[in-house]
Image: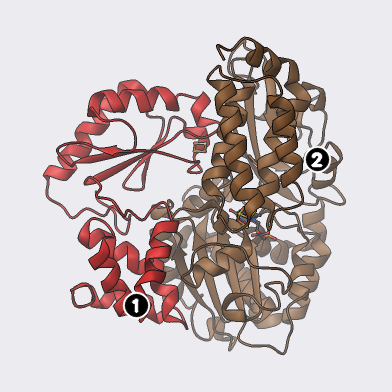
Amino acid sequence: MPKTELKEYIVLRNREIPNIRDLDVYVANGGYETARNALTTMTPQAIVDEVKKSGLRGRGGAGFPCGVKWGFVPKELNPKYLVVNADESEPGTFNNHEIIDLNPHQMIEGVVISAFAIGANTAYIYIRGEFAYGARLLEQVINEARERGFVGKNVFGSGFDIDIHVHRGAGAYICGEETALLESLEGKIGQPRLKPPFPAVAGLYAKPTVVNNVETLTNVPRIIAKGADWFRSFGTEKSPGTKAVSISGHVKNPGNYEIPLGITMREFIYDWAGGMRSDVPLKFIIPGGASSTWLTTEHLDTPLTWDDMAAAGTMLGSGAVVILDESVSVVKAALKIDEFFKHESCGKCTPCREGTHFLVKVWERIDEGHGRSGDIELLADVGTQMLGKCFCPLGDSAVSAVNSAIKFFRPEIEAEIAGGTH
Amino acid sequence: MLYDKHKAEIDAILAKYPSKRSALLPMLYIAQDEYGRLDRDSIGEVAEILDLPPTDVYEVAGFYTLFYNEEVGKIVLDVCDDVPCCFCGAEELVADLENRLGVKAGHTTNDKLFTLRRVKCIAACDQAPVLQANLEFHNKVTPDKVDTLLAELRSEIESGKPISISGRFAEH
Ligand SMILES: Cc1cc2nc3c(=O)[nH]c(=O)nc-3n(C[C@H](O)[C@H](O)[C@H](O)COP(=O)(O)O)c2cc1C
Ligand code: SF4
Ligand code: FES
């Protein structure tokens, strides 16, 4: 089958328009005109409706319909906040990184339009601490936009005020979870909050707050400029649009690719990312970030959409495909992934805090040649005790690697235990 | 004192938020750059500026990986050894750096110039093996590039230009 064409870029427009990160270039290509039109000729409700109609789903992991979430914000409560989730810390994910570094004005324009739509006069961009350059760049980009009257008081003479601030995190994956993010933005340790209340009702400083991912908001100016129907001409009925997907590991051409949603994993790996980097065959795929359940070669025909990935027992997640070849030890991979979750567990609840420790301990002894018979059952049992019993999704995520490894590669783990020095 | 020396920056930070406490993370970055780490005194000073109990500030400083409670070198080298980097040359890079610097990951060289750490995914997996030096990215650091990189970093330190271990400003 020939490679599916992407008619045009929606979010990674830096691939098409050189230097689009410079304000002059962005403006020369119609930049901020959409915000001007939206703020001076549309009502907030009309923007919410158009985004609803577009079917835009949140790009941060859960795929929740963006316009629907905006609709949950109570009109009468003020002030309201828009928070941009630029924490991007899910292993394998680096698409927000590219948008921030190379197409930042489109994201800022998305913030202006979206803040107007929900009635927020203040937006915070919560950016992971490691994106030190990105944070400085965004400060600069916002200043440039402010100097032209695109951000600040009475933007485009519309009477609408929007302040945008950059807030750097300081190294903690859990701060990508929206309520932990809000805690962190309030100057506290990043531990998730009990939901409900949802942030839309009581979020930052207990005020109505919408938290959206970088890529989600970067879609907004294009949807408003070209309409929901145009947006829906990309992707599938239930997963409209495109997705910037990161692919890494043992492929020939790792990187970000903006794909029309709905192409198969096979097409993505072989036609877009160039296939495997060497003759060593594909062993398994971590398809949606470290939190996701693995796939193997038998799943290559799964379309990349939220629903198809769920039907295959995994998730599209943050749009991060990690390809690993036969040189990789399953035990080592599972160990590394659970080390990640152990390191990033915020410590708030026992099943996650203790469970991740335990998983790492068992994986470690198998990896070091001291595995015991019964260790596989032990891992599965700890996983069962964690699943559904953790305070936030991070705990469950640590079990994905365990269950995937056991389901697809049990004989390899058994052999490693049997062959160990004990 | 921290506030007097960085008044403009601190006032601008405080102006961003309706609550003083929200300024805690950015304040800790400033204090860390000023004092080289977050020890008792620097934490006390931040607590005072923000009207917070020092114990709250300790708790926050201990939670995040980019706050250093122990002494670190002039340049902190963070090598990503997560999945997939660990299968794409990260282990070799860590071993190489350990050899050349003469310290194990997690430690600071005797001359106090470098701290070498293993870190989790830094969102540049397609650039493996990848590291950050004081939070600036260095992509595709294959063994043949390590010498040049270390030499560059050393000359940056020797140039005497201000250095930000917190990544508040660019160093070159
Ligand atoms: C442990 C954990 C980490 C998360 N990390 C991120 C992240 O780095 N970036 C992000 O946009 N969403 C992340 N999310 C999802 C957010 O909680 C939230 O759903 C998202 O920011 C909403 O934006 P969206 O609807 O535009 O996708 C994370 C969720 C969990 C449970
Ligand atoms: S599941 Fe883990 S990360 Fe989530 S609240 Fe519990 S301890 Fe914290
Ligand atoms: S795993 Fe190393 S940068 Fe993502």
| Front residue of A289 and A246 | A289
Question: Are circles 2 and 1 on residues that touch, CB within 8 Å?
Answer: no
Q: Circle 1 sits on which residue?
A: B12
Mark 1 residue type: Ala
Q: Which mark identifies residue A309? A: 2
Q: Is residue A394 visible?
A: no
Q: Which mark identifies residue A59? A: none
Quarter placement of the C terminus of chain A = top right
Q: Which chain letter matches label 1?
A: B
Relative vertical location of residue B75 with respect to residue A412 in this rendering, above or below? below
> Chain B's shade in the image?
red
Q: How many marks?
A: 2
Q: Residue B34 is drawn in which quadrant?
A: bottom left
- Which chain did the image draw in brown? A
Mark 2 residue type: Met
Measured as percent of width and height from the top left, residue B20 is found at 41, 80
Q: Is residue A115 visible?
A: yes
Measured as percent of width and height from the top left, residue A178 is found at 62, 63
Q: Secondary structure at mark 1?
A: helix
Measured as percent of width and height from the top left, residue B71 is found at 24, 50
Q: Residue, x 58% and y 75% (percent of image)? A: A204
Measured as percent of width and height from the top left, residue A111 is found at 59, 69
Left-right relation of A3 to A364: right
Q: Which chain letter matches label 2?
A: A
Q: Residue A232 is drawn in which quadrant?
A: bottom right
Left-right relation of B101 to B105: left
